[in-house]
Amino acid sequence: MLKPKMTPTRELVNLDGLWAFATDAMVGDAPWTAPLPSGLEAAVPASYNDLFIDPEIRDHVGWVWYQRTVRVPRGWDGERVFVRLDSATHHGRVYVDEALVAEHSGGYTPFEADITELVPAGAEFRLTIGVSNELTNETIPPGELTVDDLGVRRQRVRADFYNYSGIARSVWLHSVPVDRIEDITVTTTVEGSAGVVTYQVDATGTRDVRVRIVDESGAQVGEATGASGQVPIPDVVLWQPGEGSLYDLVAEIVDGDAVIDQYPLPFGVRTIEVRGSEFLINGRPFYFTGFGKHEDSLVRGKGHDDAYLVHDFQLMGWIGANSFRTSHYPYAEEVLEYADRQGIVVINETAAVGLHYSIAAGITGENRRTFAPDAINGKTQAAHAEAIRELIDRDKNHPSVVMWAIANEPATHEDGAREYFEPLIRLTKELDPTRPVTSVNMFMSTPETDQVADLLDVMCLNRYYGWYENTANLAVAEIRLEAELRGWAEKYGRPILMTEYGADTLAGLHSIFAPPWSEEYQVQLLEMYHRVFDRVPEFVGEHVWNFADFQTSAAIFRVDGNKKGVFTRDRRPKSAAHVLRQRWTQVGNDK
Ligand code: GCB
């Protein structure tokens, strides 16, 4: 699905701002498509949870309703008119006046509704959007609904981040021509000094399709006719880590000289390859430095915010991070577009986090089978497949995306894991044969016990030696960590990336004895990991957990959230930031 864009043939109206808001309890028996009764207004985009000072709204389980009036521009007569949500977390329903026009599950990918037949150009309508935050064993991510002793419904999440809900990304009204470009796929290879662009344009209607390739100065450097084909770019400027050189593929539907539809798609020319234990970008070994991140900030929750986007990338540049993982869900498209332009490398993850019934947030808990009819089952797998499809469909053209992570810390050591994951890994590779595929591994899945690692291109490991295990004993942690990494290297000979390592750290807590939670301990733990990484030749990168402190569900081991950030939640550096900066600005890509 193409991101809505203003082009010579397409228009759009941004619907962000203040919307009337109510929870289902406030609406009661009244139809939610009638004007909402609460008098509350919610900011879009933002998670609704922290906007209000009402704990019942913050921890509400179920549907909430957003509403506003919208006028279709009078000049859109004869066009197709769509309402598009960049996301609704986790289930969305869209109503035009009383009519349900779209329904979608999966809280981090876009969906839209064609409302042309319902509202004529120039007319106004009431747009109501329902959003439910309920998660079950058959959703991605999975969760559990319970009822407490007082009869209050509770949502248990199996992931270590707050279940921020609502409309956290933009909402659009947009027009497209009747005959239109519906999708574009671009892949690239390099032959000598030329780039070769393979494209496919999916268009409605039977008219001719043509494409032009335009460089950053606006000069045309290639062209072709037909809905699919190849275009060479002589003396191509490659997209590189640190250098986000882009081209536009301008796709057009034409009728003689008339342009019926036009859509410019930015893309970069680069190659990705896993060879032996190396991860190659443009044929050169790449060493990842950076973070697992979250979309998380005060008040906005997971609401996308361009100011935080720019500031977070500035901090990543300052510290020498060349990459990050979209832990644990697809991020706003603006983030990937910015990464493309900034030359920041991205591991792009689905929202399949918590497919593990015996742990919660890295801590062992109940002893239940994960792959079972009442837990992660065939319906979960179908939802997971859909999450993979929607992620690849949305993000396949971003040069910054170098690998798909189809899950975070599933129970890949348990019976049933291979049956569950093998078809999903195959699906991912079918949908995109150009990028490596991984599933991020957790500590119970060792080289001896893991059942899917041989199907993956890169070993991505989350390890907490020195934190959840060998707490306060970094000397033993160092021996254990090294032994395990060597075990992975020997058994699989694939590239190994540490996708999480870190320690909760209370900013400002200092001690000569460097106990856990102190800034000194975080520094010493990271330095210990780095010594080990530097001794293992198959190692291709280090992503610290986490870029910044972030909000979680309440738990006795969480102090106003997870404090493993190298920056605080308001993006101030802890001592570890300076240590990482020293290492990463020296090591960089030359390691
Ligand atoms: C993990 C999870 C991450 C948690 C982290 C922690 O393994 O992947 O979501 O936040 O551990 O801090 O416990």
Image: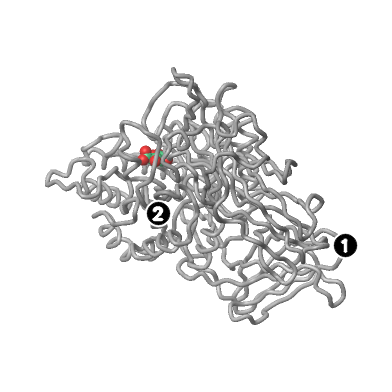
Rendered image coloring scheme: one colour
Quadrant of the rendered image containing residue 99: top right
Q: Is residue 520 left or right of residue 297?
A: left
For image coordinates 57% across by 21% down, the residue present is 374
Q: Amino acid at mark 2?
A: Gly
- For label 1, the SS is loop
Q: Which image quarter holds the C terminus?
A: bottom left
Q: Nearer the viewer, residue 184 or 460?
A: 184
Number of the front mark, 2 or 1: 1
Q: Quadrant of ligand 1?
A: top left
Residue that carries the numbered disc 1 in the rendered image: 206
For image coordinates 62% across by 75% down, the residue present is 194
Q: Residues within 10 Å of mark 1 (few under 14, many from 20)?
A: few
Residue 123 lies, in percent from the top left, at: 76, 56
Q: Is residue 589 left or right of residue 176?
A: left
Does the beta carbon of the residue at mark 1 sit less than 8 Å from ligand 1?
no
| Total count of labels | 2
Quadrant of the rendered image containing residue 124: bottom right
Q: Is residue 415 at least partly visible in the picture? A: yes
